[in-house]
Image: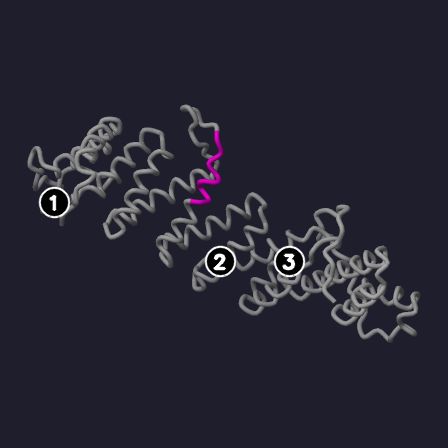
């Protein structure tokens, strides 16, 4: 069994002997490119990154225009040395050199793993150095790095992890529109993932949280209704435990009806009775069992748009849930007749 040093490992080539101990089998010939790279690798492993960086910079300067088989590893190792020396942002330039110039090398995936790791540190709160002090938020760079991993190594395990981590990040910081979109992308790209259930569930919550109230666009609630139904069919037990059931669909229905009622009132204030009437008719047709539908009927009768109230098919479903983050004073998104 052989163990060859990696970017973080030992410089020498070792072999496991019969007694269970590693013994040195070969040392690179002094003065060769292999020896230089091995020495840099050893210095990094021994926590001497500045020395390794110096050696690698001189070597890269001498060989950067050559078709040298050690160039990819040299860039990767220098990135590792710079990272170990506390400047992970500058190390990204060397990792990018590996990714862009050596896509067929073994170091390609390793460089993307390094970028993923740095991206996660930035999303976790690590700040970029500015004049030697960590002042600037690294979150935008972290987002970009996780997107790049997915683009450059699609369908891989690393891309899958980057996708769910980015979606979870948006969910954590309450960027619900981005979270809903990213969970949707994740489910499209990785339909068999072990994270599928969580992604489906959080996509529902993200869309519900996007709804700001009856004065605003109700598209997120409409999408949430379909997503709840899909989740209930796929994971019935989990849906029941999480409250993602017909009861939630009914509450969403109440909120959608309230949004349409508010839109009709806005049309009335704008002296556009035709649009108000069409909106109320849609409300009665699409959400007949809601409290908003009962109020819509009263408005229709009062304005002579309905001869008499029809006999109700269902009882009102209860109080309108508090799904609004803010009622605001903006004009509503007008319903499409």
| Secondary element at image label 2 | helix
Q: Looking at the picture, tell me which residue is in the foreground, 274 or 14.
A: 274
Judging depth in this view, the residue of 169 and 232 nearest the camera is 169
What is the quadrant of the C terminus in the image?
bottom right
Q: Is residue 249 left or right of residue 91?
A: right
Identify the residue under disc 3: 220
Frontmost of labels 1 and 2 is 2
* Residue identified by numbered label 2: 185
Q: Residue at x 88, y 64 (%)?
A: 299
Task: Tell me the quarter of the picture where residue 70 sits.
Answer: top left
Task: Specify whether 219 is left or right of 132.
Answer: right
Looking at marks 2 and 3 on the same chain, the residue that comes earlier in the sequence is marked by 2
Mark 3: secondary structure: helix
Front residue of this view, candidates 80 and 32: 32
User: Residue 92 bears which disc, if any?
Assistant: none
Check if mark 2's residue and mark 3's residue have beta carbons within 8 Å. Answer: no
Q: Magenta stretch: residue 18 in it?
A: no
Nearer-N-terminus badge (1/2):
1
Residue 15 image label: 1
**Residue at point 43%, 27% (across, down):** 130
In terms of sequence position, does the residue under pointer 1 or pointer 3 come before the other? 1
**Which region is colored magenta?**
136-144
By secondary structure, the bulk of the magenta-drawn segment is best described as helix
What is the CA distance from the residue labelled 1 to the residue labelled 2? 45 Å
Label 1 packing within 10 angstroms: few (<14), some (14-19), many (20+): some
Compared across the picture, whether 89 is left or right of 331 comes to left
Task: Give percent across and percent down for residue 298.
Answer: 89, 65
Residue at image coords 51%, 49%: 168
Q: Which residue sits at x=29%, y=42%?
A: 97
């Amino acid at each position: 069994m052989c163990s060859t040093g990696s970017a973080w490992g030992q410089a020498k080539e070792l072999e496991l002997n019969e007694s269970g101990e590693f013994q040195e089998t070969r040392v690179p010939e002094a003065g060769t490119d292999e020896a230089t790279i091995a020495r840099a690798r050893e210095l990094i492993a021994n926590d001497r990154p500045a020395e390794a960086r110096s050696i690698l910079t001189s070597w890269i300067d001498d060989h950067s225009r050559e078709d040298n088989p050690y160039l990819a590893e040299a860039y990767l190792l220098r990135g590792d040395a710079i990272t170990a020396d506390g400047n992970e942002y500058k190390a990204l330039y060397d990792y990018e050199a590996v990714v862009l110039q050596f896509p067929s090398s073994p170091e390609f995936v390793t460089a993307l793993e390094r970028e993923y790791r740095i991206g996660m540190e930035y999303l976790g709160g690590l700040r970029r150095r500015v004049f030697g002090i960590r002042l600037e938020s690294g979150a935008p760079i972290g987002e970009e790095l996780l997107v790049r991993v997915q683009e450059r190594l699609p369908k891989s395990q690393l891309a899958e992890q980057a996708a769910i981590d980015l979606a979870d990040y948006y969910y954590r910081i309450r960027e619900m529109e981005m979270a809903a979109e990213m969970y949707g992308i994740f489910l499209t790209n990785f339909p068999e993932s072990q994270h599928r259930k969580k992604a489906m569930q959080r996509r529902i919550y993200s869309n519900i949280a996007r709804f700001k109230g009856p004065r605003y666009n109700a598209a997120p609630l409409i999408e949430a209704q379909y997503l709840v139904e899909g989740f209930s069919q796929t994971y019935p037990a989990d849906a029941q435990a999480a409250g993602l059931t017909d009861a939630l669909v009914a509450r969403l229905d109440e909120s959608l009806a309230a949004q349409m009622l508010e839109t009709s009132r806005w049309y009335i204030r704008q002296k556009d009775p035709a649009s108000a009437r069409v909106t109320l008719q849609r409300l009665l047709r699409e959400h007949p069992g809601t409290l908003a539908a009962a109020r819509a009927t009263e408005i229709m009768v009062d304005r002579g748009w309905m001869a008499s109230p029809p006999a109700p098919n269902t009882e009102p479903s209860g109080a309108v849930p508090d799904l609004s983050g803010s009622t605001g004073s903006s004009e509503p998104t007008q319903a499409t007749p």
